[in-house]
Image (tube, rainbow, N blue to C red):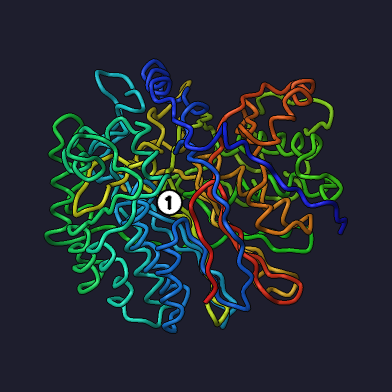
Amino acid sequence: MIKYSRLKPTFSSKKRLFKPFFAALVVSALGSSPVFAVEEDLAPESATGISKNASVISEGALVVTAHPLATAAGQQILRNGGTAADAAVAIQAMLTLVEPQSSGIGGGAFMLYWDQQHKQLHAYDGRETAPALAGEKLFYRDGKPMKWHDAMVGGRSVGTPGVLKMLELSHSRHGNQSWKSLFSSAIQQSKEGFTVGPRLHQLIASNINPGLKRYPEALNYFFTGEEEPLPIGFNRTNPELAQSLTLIAEKGASAFYQGPLARKITEKVQQISDNPGLLSMNDMAAYAAKERSPICLPYLSYKVCGFPPPTSGGVTVLQILKLLENQPLADMPPSSLEFNHVFTQASRLAFADRGRYLADADFVDVPVNALLSQPYLDQRAQLISAEQDMGKAAAGEPEKINLSRADDQSPERPSTSHFVVRDQWGNAVSMTTSIEMAFGSTVMAGGFLLNNQLTDFSFVAEKDGQLVANRVQPGKRPRSSMSPFMVFDKNGELYAAIGSPGGSRIINYVAQSLLVMLNTDIPLQEVVNLPHVSNRNSLTELEQGTPAEQLQEQMEKLGHKIKVRDLNSGLHGFRRLNDGRWESGVDNRREGEALSQ
């Protein structure tokens, strides 16, 4: 493996620190554009500055999350003798309180779980589902598709939350602590309160979600009595969330899906006056988390594993890796024109296939094996030129696949969180969790926000006479881009775990990190802090305020259409070092923390 000087990315604090989100611009763009035309414009969260997050080197167990209190909650479970599955429950409960804009028990998640004793990788699906009464025209008004921001706010966009059922499923199979004990830290913190940090304050102030002041529960929770954003340093208590978590801790996830709490959720959704939803008590009671088969491919000397549909992340990231496997990436510094050009070309090809083929495989035929077959990927890789941007790529046509599908790049704005855990026995979790847009639907019930994940569906069921795979159907899970990944060495032992928030750009963030991680010796902390370059089969985006901006002129000469913008990831991961210890990676774009046991 070729080693080269380690990159030390610099970030302009003038450009990025607490940079306000241009909310008026966004609302104007959304208000004048059809839903399928806003993919490039709206970030899931505005940038809130650069933190200096320290990497941790651990002899064994470690936790990496997006908030110090969530990391500490997971660490405490591990110190109590719990497994990674136990820690995941405690972490998610705490994130519901301290990172409410990004994830919570009102949302959904995907989890990869490595069982070290049995050498088995599990994939647990807690993605939200469409209500039984939802139809293909869920997001139609006056005979035409709604504008995205009109659909997002309120009850219409709320899917049946899945994260608690998923956590209960994984805990029942892999946990060793009592379910009740896993909520203690979050319940106590909800009563005592947590300190509002710069990121949450800035997101409230940014007006990134136009619905945050629309409903009294969210208005009273996120703003002062004078309707000012909660200031940095404010102690935010949440006694209602403490009550909800206590009920769930004592009675299990069923307390969320049946009974008074479920009724409170469904009544809130249905009774929103300006944009009511369809979520019912029957939808809540019928929800089931699923175990699916992970998708794994060899890459160099490793086995790389991701999550299958209904998320598009696993297939699309693996396609990018395999399309570039024969490129001499070890000779290309990640900051170079050569690396970033071929990376964007592979991303174009993979996103083209994503738009046509990927959706909930329980409802539509998703040709995963064909899309990941070596002959097909070899054929597609030949389309990559080192000399010229290919422009908008067309979806491929794998052999023996006869599917008449319309291309679709439905907008997706997950304000999401990713965390990783490794316990003392070597079990591990890589979990991405989300309520979709920052602050979700802005509907609150039981002290937590409800998701707006149904806006991840295509608002139109067909285009040019062809059905869209990701159309709304009752009980269907909307397509996601969440990309929890794990990597294994040639002996089948766990080598690394990683994931990120970031909407459909998650795919680019995770693919970039995996390519650099597996082709170089750059420390993981530097890998997750690398400047981002993104292409989702449209513009090539360069991360503002970073050395990536220096690529603009060179890439334009190759035909790229460039947009310089915030690319606000939240990459968290760990990797095994040559001496057997484990290093963490904590993205400095957020406020995360890593701790060893």
Q: Say what secondary structure mark 1 lies in.
A: loop
The residue at 37%/76% (across/down) is 172
Q: Position of residue 445 (x, y in %)?
A: 19, 50
As drawn, 363 above or below 143 = below
Q: Nearer the viewer, residue 122 or 520?
A: 520
Residue 430 seen: no
Q: Which residue is mark 1?
A: 362
Q: Position of residue 228 (x, y in %)?
A: 26, 35
The image quadrant that residue 125 belongs to is bottom left
Describe residue 561's horizontal placement relative to residue 593 as left or right.
right
The residue at 20%/72% (across/down) is 251
Describe residue 163's horizontal placement relative to residue 510 as left or right.
left
Describe residue 157's horizontal placement relative to residue 382 as left or right.
left
- Disc 1 residue type (three-letter): Asp
Q: Nearer the viewer, residue 159 or 290?
A: 159
Q: Position of residue 133 (x, y in %)?
A: 23, 41
Residue at the outermost top position: 32
- The tally of labels here is 1
Q: Nearer the viewer, residue 311 or 513?
A: 513
Q: Nearer the viewer, residue 110 or 593?
A: 593
Q: Position of residue 510 (x, y in %)?
A: 61, 49
As drawn, 274 above or below 490 = above
Q: What crowding class fits label 1: few (fewer than 14 Cα within 10 Å), some (14-19), or many (20 or more)?
A: few
The image quadrant that residue 89 belongs to is bottom left
Residue 468 seen: yes
Quadrant where the image shows the N terminus: bottom right
As drawn, 209 above or below 190 = above
The residue at 78%/55% (across/down) is 519
The residue at 52%/77% (across/down) is 597
